[in-house]
């Protein structure tokens, strides 16, 4: 592999690369490679860059204990295996 030397990186770029490396526990070299691959479309964005969706957050924990148990019972009934279908 070829080595590339980068000079005069903007302070903001340096700061963000260092932050990515520190938060993901990777080397600066690995952080730069990942950013380049992501930007060039050669790799999926890392999970830290994937959007987080919070549309259903207000519903989390909204069921009473009885409602949760009724839901679990309904699911258990749907999970029953019909042996005749597997002959």
Image (cartoon, rainbow, N blue to C red):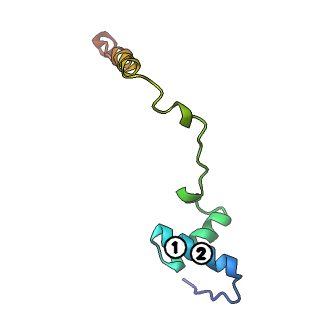
User: What secondary structure is marked by label 2?
Assistant: helix
Q: Residues within 10 Å of mark 2 (few under 14, many from 20)?
A: some
Q: Position of residue 40 (x, y in %)?
A: 67, 66
- Compute the Cα span from label 2 to label 1: 6 Å
Q: Which residue is drawn at 67% across and 65% down?
A: 39
Reading the image, the residue beneath label 2 is: 17
**What numbered label is drawn on residue 21?**
1
Q: Which residue is drawn at 56% across and 77% down?
A: 18
Q: Which of 2 and 38 is in front in this view?
A: 38
Is mark 2 in CB contact (under 8 Å) with mark 1? yes
Q: Where is residue 3 in the image (x, y as percent from the top left)?
A: 58, 87
Q: Residue at x 45, y 71 (%)?
A: 25
Number of callouts in the render? 2
Q: Is residue 14 left or right of residue 86?
A: right
Q: Where is residue 74 in the image (x, y as percent from the top left)?
A: 38, 15
Quarter containing the C terminus:
top left
Q: Nearer the viewer, residue 63 or 4?
A: 63
User: What secondary structure is marked by label 1?
Assistant: helix
**What numbered label is drawn on residue 59?**
none
Q: Which of 12 and 50 is in front in this view?
A: 12
């Amino acid at each position: 592999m070829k080595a590339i030397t980068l000079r005069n990186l903007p302070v903001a770029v340096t700061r963000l690369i260092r932050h990515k490396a520190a938060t993901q526990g990777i080397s600066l070299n690995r952080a730069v490679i990942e950013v380049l691959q992501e930007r060039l479309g050669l790799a999926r964005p890392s999970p830290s860059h994937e959007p987080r969706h919070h549309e259903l957050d207000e519903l989390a924990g909204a069921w009473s204990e009885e409602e949760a148990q009724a839901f679990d019972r309904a699911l258990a009934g749907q999970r029953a295996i019909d042996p005749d279908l597997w002959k």
